[in-house]
Amino acid sequence: MRFQDIPGLGSIKNTLIHSVETNHVAHAQLFHGGVGSANLALAWAYATYINCEDRNAISSNTNSELVGDACGCCASCVKMAKMVHPDIHHIFPTPSAKETILELLPTWRKFLMESPYRSMTDWLEFTGVTGNKQGIIPIKEAHNIIEKISLKAFEAEYKILIIWQPELMNIESANSLLKLLEEPPAKTLFILVCNDTNRLLTTILSRTQRIMIPSFSDEETIGYLIKKEGISLERAKQVAYLSEGNLSKAVELINYEGEGKYQWFSNWMRMAFKPDFAALIKLADEFDASPKEYQKGMMEYGLNIFRDLLLWKNGAESLVRLEGEELTFVQNFSKVVKLGAIELIVNELSQTHYYLERNGRAKILHLDLSLTIARLFKK
Ligand SMILES: [Zn+2]
């Protein structure tokens, strides 16, 4: 990760570059930015820049506003890109005290290399955790890494410790970090990458130099989405508007569309048909946790399917535009659901859409809808 790989944020990047060039690298820095901001990506790019053996070798066709960047091809840059540099250490939350940071390191590398703009929820999902787990930074782990930090650097001038989500340290971990910040080992740089400074000890806050990382602008989000996700300008504009500078949310909005929709919808309908109430409650929770735009999109999708079901039932098969598994779904359900029930379900779906738009509680709306549909299926 180099500065030029991160969209926008020219003045922050240049400030960081300047601090290195003028020998004013503060030993403890706090990169504070919202979820889906560039705070972690910038920490990575900054560490890469500091350790680069051929800095400022910025090629002419890249971001002209940057005053410098890492070369991207020296031994250090190559290791940094693969996240295997021996002088860079990572502390990040693990799903439970059972998994150690060392065990999760390969997964962490993969996660970061795929995209460094993601949220804690994304990370937990990536580790394969299900349910309502929260990440923690175990004290034992923090100690192990802090011990390593006290050793001399192997290859680089600086040892760098990147702590992602320091707000998830328990009081013990935070205190041992504090001790280290008070008496820092020589040539060691701490970069704390956080979303919420209110949850950090004030004693830690007061010992770090705080750098505010703004959310991405719409233009930066649009550029990123077109380049990385290959979507149209028009769609990128819509998503940028909805995600408010949060790249994690933007990518989530895009991924929620398409293939997954039918699977989710058809599973929901099957559970309502059975009916499996335990599964319906779980689905309501899932629905509640998804982005608002996805929720509304799901209602619109359901409306399309049920309107086609209505056409099919009325003998207007030629007007049904569905294909593949969606068409099979309509054919199968038309055999078991009565016409009157379909009409009522169409009504219910459009009502729910209306309430979602007016910020009704998604979980309750969805559960209500599921129970009504289950009842109507049996009519
Ligand atoms: Zn380099």
Image (cartoon, grey):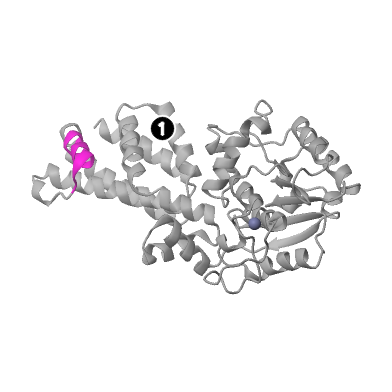
Find disc 1 in the rendering and name its residue.
280
Name the image quarter holding residue 109.
Answer: top right
Disc 1 marks a residue whose amino acid type is Leu
The answer to if 330 sits in the magenta stretch is yes
Query: Residue 74's spot in the image, x, y percent?
Result: 63, 54
Name the image quarter holding residue 339.
Answer: top left
- Viewport quadrant of the C terminus: top left
Residue 230 located left or right of residue 84: left
- Which quadrant of the figure shows ligand 1? bottom right
- Viewport quadrant of the N terminus: bottom right
The answer to if 281 sits in the magenta stretch is no
Neighbours of disc 1 within 10 Å: few (<14), some (14-19), many (20+): many
- Choose between 143 and 170: the one closer to the eye: 143
Q: Residue at x 37, y 41 (%)?
A: 369
Q: Residue at x 12, y 51 (%)?
A: 319
Determine whether the residue tagged by mark 1 lies in a helix, strand or loop: helix
* Residue span colored magenta: 322-333
- Magenta stretch mostly in which secondary structure? helix
